[in-house]
Image (cartoon, grey):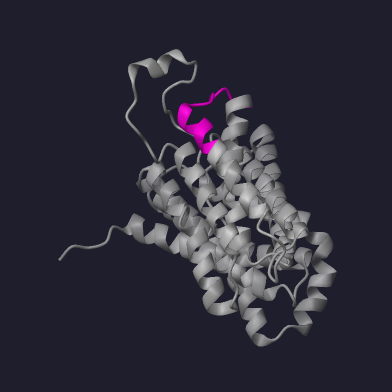
Amino acid sequence: MRTIPLPAVAATVTVVLWASAFVVIRDLGPVFSPGPMAFLRLLFGVVALTAVLVVTRMRTAGRMAPRPGWPRGRALGLVIAYGVAWFGGYSVLLNWAEQHLDAGTAALLVNVAPIIVAIYAGFFLGEGFTRSLVVGIVVAFGGVVLITAGGDGAHADWLGLVLGLMSAVLYAAGVLLQKVALREVDAVMATWLGAVAGLVATLPFAPTAVRELGAASAGELVAIVFLGVGPTAIAFTTWAYALSRTDAGAMAATTLVVPAIVIGMSWLFLGELPSALRVVGGVLCLAGVAIGRGLVRWPTRRTDRCVGIPDDEGVPSSSGTG
């Protein structure tokens, strides 16, 4: 009997949990304001990630392997920066965006982040612009235009669209900072420290979070704990496990299903759907990301080398987190 590979199971757990975060954030919008929701999510996430870190270090000690050291200097600064940008700022903006956007549209906008990462890397990290990346940027930009032109409806407005795009920018910034930090810092340690940095950055929201937590129902308490434990602690851990044991391109392709899962969950649990035009725009965005990442390829011709655009090479990848 053929068994399912554990990395595939881990990747599936990751994308489902990340997708569920968009729906839970949207559902909790009337109960928790953006900053306090981010603080509480990170609080419960740090508790769970601390347990993951302790278990990981115990296993390392059991194998008589050297324990990952505490990052210092530049490495520590990078981890703190990406934690504040990604775990902190991105979470607050996404929570705010989803008070004005349905979960599906928010997920579609956030998944533009990989293209932003690739553009920055092309200009500032010396990775250049491949033919696939240029085509992907154009296609994804067309998708963003359709999403923003989708018209104000019951589940989306212009403020939400702007906040959604700002979330994608902060998410991309966090990915770029993390990419550099992981050259010097262990992945589990970097994730835990990043979450701690985000928690510290959202501490000003703590008093309001306590008041809103006291007014929440039992089901809403479970939901906010789930945001910290599921999409934050568990999903980042299973992502790291799957990424370390499979091809990065395959993992990048896996995350492209997140918006589709979000739209399905949003329709099933919240009765909300993006407009048809925004769905088309989202499909174009995801197609652009797939092309830009080199996940969609076509035969190359010898004359392609004469136009000044290099053949397809690796493009930095990131995940569609919630």
Q: Quadrant of residue 59?
A: bottom left
Q: Which residues are magenta?
A: 124-137
**Whole-percent x, y for residue 126 in the image:** 57, 22
- Vertical arrangement, residue 186 with respect to residue 268, above or below: above
- Quarter of the image where the C terminus is located: bottom right
Relative side of 258 to 192, left or right: left
Q: Is residue 83 visible from the viewing direction of this image?
A: no
Dividing the picture into quadrants, the one containing residue 270 is: bottom right
| Residue visible at 45% across and 21% down in the picture | 310
On whether residue 314 falls in the magenta region, the answer is no
Where does the image place residue 211, in percent across and percent down from the top left? 82, 77
Q: Is residue 77 above or below residue 61?
A: above
Name which residue lies at 43% across and 63% down: 13
Please determine whether, in this image, residue 294 is positioned above or below residue 188: above
* Horizontal side of residue 238 vs 109, given as left or right: left
* Image x and y of residue 51, in percent: 54, 63
